[in-house]
Image (cartoon, rainbow, N blue to C red):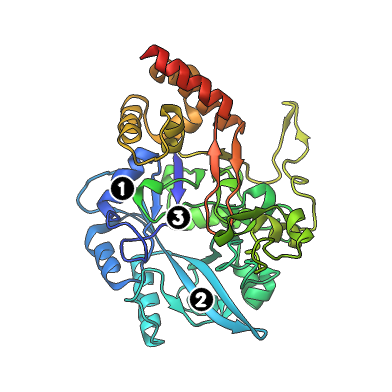
């Protein structure tokens, strides 16, 4: 059974998140996207957890479905992100971690413990906890040994385990004796597996990718693809696959192009300055316009901690007689979300424009879910239904033939599938056809 899992999302009770994030609407959008296992997100928030208890029932061990019977193939896993702010080794730390829980009962115990410690669960779906990551993981394991913690968006400058502003140089520095219990790490939108594999210390870990979506429309912009025996489908089996780096059952991750992430390179948003690591070193880490410190992005931070060249580890040796390389690590496929592709093809700047939303719905209706279009369908089928420009656009996304102005200091990167010259020719052609 093919499982496409997005295990890091938020609810309408998290800051700056859409009011459209309901359990029913989430399932509706997952069907459009092609996701069939979604994290609940925000299970620590009292009102959201009430929704979870009222509207979900266990379908398989540790996995849940809507009691209403709507979207019967959709499953939920109990997940949450916590924001930890604390001091360690004399330095202020701001770390975001993901918590995967095996049941609603386990979540009740986690929430009761948070209340006992007088943490505020009501203020935000992503609660702020003044507790060390090592201590937190140990306490969670004392609550239920099946609970799993994984670093969220591990390289984001401001709030992550390796963040340039408030993180650590190693997992051991962050998690201490609990490091042995960390077996997965979320790469985040601004890095991809190739970048992470430049650190040999991460070799033992599964690299997972999730959307961190603040609206249903962004579900699946990063995700994880598994092949799971239907009889074994459960929370425990999903965690086993990650723990053992079981590449028979963990097929690949779906990735943003990391340049599109909003912290890929170094920069200063106020001065609209974006610099690659070489340029940053040349200016001594200071903005060349105003002289203030640059926000050091993911690419620089990876290079700082790496003990291998980027791209040095991708696949293993050829095995057997098939002349096919056996991957050393779980492979990945990079995508650009379908609305962004449509926007460029139809020549508009906003992915929320009526032209884009109308074509998106038409494509989903005629061709199937978004992942089918982006990854699986023959290009000829896409071209026959929506023209040569759409076929060529999807082909270039699959092949990586893109032009990307990289993201920096909170600004998303800008993706262009066609060059400026090609777009100019396309506009002339479209006017002639009109």
Given the current orientation, which residue lies at the most extreme top position? 433
Left or right placement of residue 301 versus residue 364 in this view: right
Q: Residue at x 26, y 69 (%)?
A: 47
**Which residue is more in the foreground, 226 or 343?**
343
Q: Position of residue 396 (x, y in %)?
A: 57, 28
| Residue position marked by numbered label 2 in the rendering | 84
Q: Could you tell me if residue 339 is visible in this image?
A: yes
Task: Looking at this view, name the residue that lies furthest to the front.
Answer: 289
* Residue 202 visible to the viewer: no
- Whether residue 339 is situated above or below residue 122 in the rendered picture: above
In this view, the residue in front, 291 or 401, is 291
Disc 1 packing (10 Å; few <14; some 14–19; many ≥20)? many
Q: Which residue is mark 3?
A: 7
Q: Which residue is mark 1?
A: 27
Near mark 2 (Cα within 10 A), the count class, few <14, some 14-19 or many ≥20, is many
Say whether disc 2 or disc 1 marks the residue closer to the N-terminus. Answer: 1
177, above or below 152, in the image? below
Q: Residue at x 65, y 67 (%)?
A: 164
Give the left or right position of residue 225, taking residue 27 as reference. Answer: right
Q: Quadrant of residue 44?
A: bottom left
Neighbours of disc 3 within 10 Å: few (<14), some (14-19), many (20+) = many
Q: In the picture, which quadrant includes the C terminus?
A: top left
Per the image, label 3 sits on a secondary structure element best described as: loop
């Amino acid at each position: 059974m093919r499982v496409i899992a997005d295990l890091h999302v938020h609810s309408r009770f998290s800051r700056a998140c859409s009011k459209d994030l309901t359990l029913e609407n989430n399932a509706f959008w997952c069907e459009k996207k092609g996701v069939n296992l979604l994290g609940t997100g925000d299970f620590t928030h009292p009102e959201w957890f009430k929704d979870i208890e009222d509207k979900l029932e266990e379908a398989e061990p540790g996995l849940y479905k809507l009691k209403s019977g709507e979207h019967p193939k959709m499953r939920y896993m109990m997940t949450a992100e916590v924001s930890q702010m604390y001091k360690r080794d004399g330095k202020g730390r701001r770390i975001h971690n993901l918590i995967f829980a095996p049941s609603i009962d386990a979540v009740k115990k986690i929430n009761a413990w948070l209340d006992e410690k007088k943490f505020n669960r009501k203020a935000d779906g992503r609660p702020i906890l003044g507790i060390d990551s090592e201590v937190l993981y140990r306490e969670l394991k004392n609550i239920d040994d099946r609970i799993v913690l994984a670093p969220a968006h591990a390289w984001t400058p401001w709030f992550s385990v390796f963040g340039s502003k408030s993180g650590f140089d190693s997992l051991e520095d962050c998690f201490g004796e609990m490091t042995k219990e960390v077996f997965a790490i979320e790469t985040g939108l601004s890095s991809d597996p190739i970048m992470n594999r430049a650190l040999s210390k991460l070799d033992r870990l599964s690299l997972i990718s999730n959307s961190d979506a603040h609206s249903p429309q962004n579900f699946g912009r990063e995700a994880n693809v598994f092949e799971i025996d239907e009889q074994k489908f459960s929370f425990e089996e999903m965690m086993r696959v990650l723990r053992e780096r079981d590449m028979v059952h963990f097929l690949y991750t779906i990735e943003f192009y990391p340049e599109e992430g909003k912290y890929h390179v170094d920069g200063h948003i106020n001065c609209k300055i974006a610099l690659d690591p070489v340029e940053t070193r040349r200016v001594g880490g200071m903005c060349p316009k105003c002289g203030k410190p640059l926000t050091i992005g993911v690419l620089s931070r990876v290079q700082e901690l790496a003990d291998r060249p980027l791209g040095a580890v991708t696949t293993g040796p050829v095995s057997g007689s098939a002349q096919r390389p056996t991957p050393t690590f779980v492979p990945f496929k990079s995508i650009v979300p379908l609305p962004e592709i449509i926007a460029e093809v139809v020549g508009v700047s906003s992915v929320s424009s009526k032209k884009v939303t109308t074509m998106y719905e038409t494509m989903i209706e005629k061709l199937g879910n978004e992942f089918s279009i982006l990854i699986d369908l023959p290009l000829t089928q896409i071209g026959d239904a929506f023209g040569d420009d759409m076929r060529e656009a999807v082909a270039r996304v699959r092949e990586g033939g893109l032009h990307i102005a990289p993201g920096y200091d909170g600004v998303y990167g800008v993706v262009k599938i066609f060059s400026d010259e090609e777009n100019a020719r396309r506009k002339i052609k479209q006017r002639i056809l009109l």
